Amino acid sequence: MSYCIAFSADGCTDVTRRYVRDASAATKRNRCSEGELIHIVREIKAMRRKDTDKKERFDLMAEDAREDEEFRRNVIESLAYTISRILPGGDAAKGSSRSDPDAQKAAEARREAEILRATAGRNAPNMPRGQGQ
């Protein structure tokens, strides 16, 4: 998988890092530069949010920041785990006690579902009929 882009009534987000943890499993991202992708995602967000009031835009920006922080934390944890397995006396030498990657993804999915439930009431009026069910 190269790109995984999530769309909502409020914009879009590149969520590839959530679903592709191992860089060796990822397909090369060569459709556009990372800078171009970030620009396009920001433009879509701006277009989708242009008619929202100031407070809602502020709330959405805070939500974006929390999600970006979570993505960065996942990358850091993955790097730290990889390094710990390489170092002498690391998990590779002792056998890993780290939780299963599938269990981690399931826990993240539960957290995402909680966030969606918490924000569903706010987004429901903006969604076209038949969506969000």
Image (cartoon, rainbow, N blue to C red):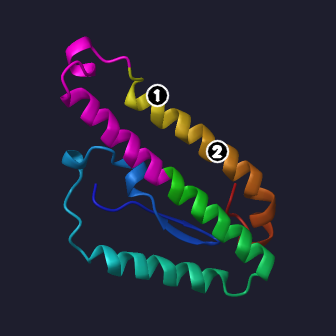
Badge 1 marks a residue whose secondary structure is: helix
Determine whether, in the image, residue 93 is placed left or right of residue 8: left
Quarter where residue 28 is shown: bottom left
Q: Is residue 81 magenta?
A: yes
Q: Is residue 99 magenta?
A: no
Our reading of the magenta stretch's main secondary structure is helix
Q: Is residue 44 above or below residue 24?
A: below
Residue 64: x percent and y percent? 59, 64
Which numbered marker is on residue 103? 1
Which numbered marker is on residue 44? none
Indicate the amino acid at tag 1: Ala
Q: Is residue 63 above or below residue 37?
A: above
Which quadrant does the C terminus fall into?
bottom right
Disc 2 from disc 1: Cα separation: 15 Å
Indicate the amino acid at tag 2: Ala
Q: Is residue 80 above or below residue 3?
A: above
Residue 68: x percent and y percent? 51, 59
Residue at x 20% of width, y 71% of height: 30
Q: Is residue 38 above or below residue 83?
A: below
Which numbered marker is on residue 113? 2
Residue at x 68% of width, y 50% of height: 115
Determine whether, in the image, residue 126 is placed left or right of residue 109: right
Give neighbour class at mark 1: few <14, some 14-19, many 20+ (Cα, 10 Å). Answer: few
Residue at x 39% of width, y 60% of height: 4
The span shown in magenta is 71-97
Determine whether, in the image, residue 15 is placed left or right of residue 12: left
Badge 2 marks a residue whose secondary structure is: helix
Quarter where residue 63 is shown: bottom right
Q: Residue furthest front?
A: 88
